Image (cartoon, rainbow, N blue to C red):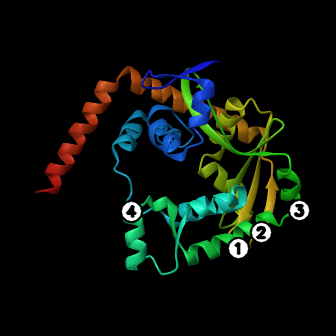
Amino acid sequence: MKSITLLNKEIFNKEEILVKMMDDTFYYGYLGKHALSSSTCKSLLESPEAYVEMLNKPPKEKEPQPFRDGRLIHLLSLEPHRIDELTIIESTKGSKAYKLAVEEQLPQTVYTLAELTRCKAVADSVLNNKDFSRLVKQAEFEVPEIGYYNGFPFRGKADILLQGVVVDLKTTSDISNFKESALLYNYDLQAALYLELFGAFEFNYVVVDKKTKEVEFITLSDEFIAGGYDKLKIATDNYKKYIDNKEFYTENYARQTMQATELSSL
């Protein structure tokens, strides 16, 4: 495949767009709007209406702390050389210094020293794990890929890619309950999608418990992967419904939003 056509019909050379995908602003910003992903599929699993609502939701003012921690642990574990890209504030989030830094930069690049210290302790438990050290010696990290599934463009980034095996680093607050959490958060859908995008034959997890610092390598069942493919079909079927009836879903959302606004003002 030499080129890829995005949802907005713009055509990119495959090699060129893979290079651009290394830039987080392009990957999460522009491409986030014009290619599907395992994240956008979460709303599509519910319905076309839920997808439209997701598209129209304003970004959250405050990112949930587990998301912030997870992203920082990923960076410290897989790309520690990028730590210089972050702004570390020694004072608390309520301080003037922190608020000023967030105003001037992306909130995702500003952390407190307390956050860094806490997440580094978790990342160190991953880096000091002998099995992880052996795994990463010949692996690639944060590898982008884009391709089609059921006729629609999908984007993805493999945390770790090694000889046809995708390995995803996950954080959890209870490692003993990870398999149940994986289904709840639709990790099965992501696994199925990445097997397709990367042409991989296996998808595994490195899971680290944020509380105990325990690290475990987990391979989930064929049934788990099959469930992910089922979810992918539901998501892409619902996206096709949205595309085929885009005007209806958009106008219906606008009408419901207006009605809700009018009721709240009474």
Q: Give the residue at mark 1.
A: 121
Q: Are marks 3 and 2 in contact (CB under 8 Å)?
A: no
Residue 74 in view of the camera: no
Residue 238 higher or lower than 180, as above or below: above
Quarter-of-image position of residue 124: bottom right
Q: Mark 4 = which residue?
A: 104
* Position of residue 209 in the picture relative to residue 137 (left or right): left
Could you say whether the residue bearing mark 1 is in a helix, strand or loop? helix
| 10 Å crowding of disc 3: few (<14), some (14-19), many (20+) | few
Crowd around label 1: few <14 · some 14–19 · many ≥20 (10 Å): some
Three-letter amino acid code at disc 2? Answer: Ser
Question: Which residue shows up at 49% across the image and 25% down it?
Answer: 6
In 3D space, how far apart are the residues under numbered discs 1 and 3 (Cα atoms)?
16 Å
Left or right of 58? Residue 69 is right
Residue kind at label 1, given as amino acid type: Ala
Write down the residue under mark 2.
125
Give the image location of residue 252, x and y in percent: 26, 33
Task: Tell me the CA gap for discs 1 and 2.
Answer: 7 Å
**Residue 130 circle label:** 3
Residue type indicated by callout 4: Glu
Q: Which of label 1 and label 4 is nearer to you?
A: 4
Element type at marker 2?
A: helix
Residue 190 is at least partly visible in this image: yes
- Residue found farthest to the front: 84
Task: Give the Cα distance between marks 2 and 4.
Answer: 33 Å
Q: Quick one: label 4, few (<14), some, or many (20+) residues within 10 Å?
A: few
Foreground of the two, 231 or 16:
16
Cα–Cα span, label 3 and label 4: 40 Å
Residue 97 in picture, x, y percent from top left: 41, 76
Structural distance between the alpha carbons of marks 3 and 2: 10 Å
